[in-house]
Image (tube, grey):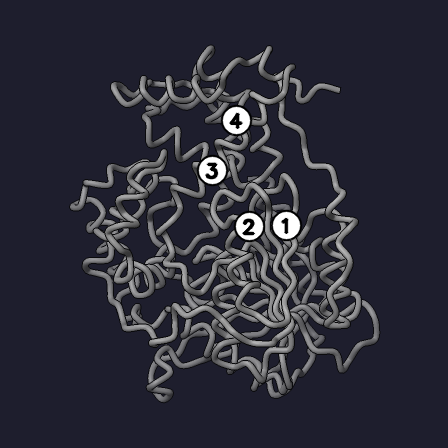
Amino acid sequence: MMKKLTLALLLSISVEGFAAETKRIGSLEFVKCMAEGERSVYPALCATLAVPENHDQPEGSTVDLALTWIPPRSDSADSIPLVFLAGGPGQGARASFPSIRSGLSRVGEFAPILLVDQRGTGESQALDCPFSEEDVAVLDANDRELAQRLARDCMERHAGRALAHYTTDDAAMDLELVRQVLGLNALNVAGVSYGTRLAQRYAALYPDQTRSLVLDSPVPSNLVLLSEHGRNLDFAISARLSACSENPECYANLGDTRLLLDELLNQLSHSPIETRYRHPRTGEYLTTSVGQNHLISVFRMLSYQPSTAVMLPTLVANAKRDGFADILALNHIVVESMQESISHGLQLSVICSESIPFLAQADVEAEADTLLGAQLIEFSRSQCEGWPQKAVLEDFHSLAAHDIPTLVVTGELDPVTPPRYGDVIAAGLTNAQHITVKGEGHSVLNVGCLPRLVADFVETLKFQETECIDNRESLPVFTGVYGWEP
């Protein structure tokens, strides 16, 4: 309670100090504000823009888009802004910005940063629903009745909203209206994860208005979302566990952690294990039942960032010896903010129109033979049976082919958007550079010298030498509970 009161007091004091100051950009007036991110606030200019909920009916209902403008730190009044698009689908840019802020810090020296909360996310009339990504991951994929009930509850929560019109192309059209209202000739567009799909669709629909693209942990336009999640995760986890087998100290301390993981999963497939653990933030003791799907879900989330992924061999060995308390506590730290930030209604609107109708049986069968299995596909299929959908444009899943300057960055061990996705994107473009960061996972703009390389690219539209990132040492595997060997 004290933390909430302190934050509220800080917000009230800060906003009060800025409330009288406004800035007109194009035909839209922004007011100084303290934008609220995930567990942090930052000074900015905030505005709201009403856009048609259905772009084919501009006189109908509207959606209020939350816009956040961060002025450049130098006198660059005429510079073209960089628009940041968050991932998910379902995350808002305003809340996500602190997690990527250092990656764009050099850009912010000479160019404004524009954060656009995609319709249905963040402060843009979020389509929040009463279930979390972790809940979905551990539920029985064959429980169609439960999946459909959760989707119905979400629809009822947002009765009156035109849920079929919360797709990627709807968001791209919103972004073009933002550009026009702000009186901007063009945009530099940066996206992370799913945000790269939105960035690429904006470029496909409005190439003359796209000055440059920065794609971090990208999704190729021809990929059907959900179709390869299990295979990508298997590769990433196998690589992390193999790093221990190839390290003499790690192997001596922990043994064959791949074999240990298989033994754990086999044990849990027969009977879940009740586990008592301590919540890492509140100190409260909790008890939960850990089954096979639950453990895989936890490992999936811990694989996203190298700071936790390098612990996987140690966590596997500890779980085999002492149980799951350590893993569950660490998982709380990793996933809590993600659960709060995802708007699952928006996620369903995107997946149900853009993915489920295009999933091939071969993809389902290939996914079934992975640790994750086809559970995300099957659960999503059940939810989408009653969710409003609309047809996508014929070129929606076509690979981009343009000469827009494009910088693609990927993490070598990304469990969801691996480097081969960056290769696919760059291969179809005539003016692109792809940088893969050794040992990294998902979302890499903050890593090493990438903030400088990104800024130099956005400023000059020229590709930079990558020696500073190519020679960077990645985090070594943990060989025990105290970290890696010196």
Outermost residue toward the right?
A: 75
Q: Residue furthest left?
A: 145
Q: Nearer the viewer, residue 35 or 100?
A: 100
In the foreground, 442 or 348? 442
What amino acid is labelled 2 in the image? Pro
Mark 4–mark 2 CB contact (< 8 Å) = no
Q: CA distance from mark 3 to mark 4?
A: 10 Å
Q: Secondary structure at mark 1?
A: strand
Q: Residues within 10 Å of mark 4 (few under 14, many from 20)?
A: many
461 to the left or right of 368: right
> Which disc number belongs to residue 241?
4
Structural distance between the alpha carbons of marks 1 and 4: 21 Å
Q: Which residue is mark 3?
A: 235
Label 2 and label 3: CA atoms lie apart by 12 Å
- Could you say which quadrant of the image residue 408 lies in? bottom right
* Residue shown at 76% from the left, 61% from the top: 464
* Nearer to the camera, 485 or 3: 485
The x and y percentages for residue 51 are: 44, 80
* CB atoms of marks 1 and 4 within 8 Å: no
Q: Is residue 331 visible?
A: yes
Q: Position of residue 306 (x, y in %)?
A: 60, 37
**Residue holding disc 2:** 419
Q: Is residue 303 above or below residue 401?
A: above
First in sequence: mark 2 or mark 1? 2
Residue corresponding to mark 1: 436
The amino acid type, in three-letter code, at marker 4 is Leu
Q: With respect to residue 260, does 158 lie above or below?
A: below
Which mark sits nearer the N-terminus, 1 or 4? 4
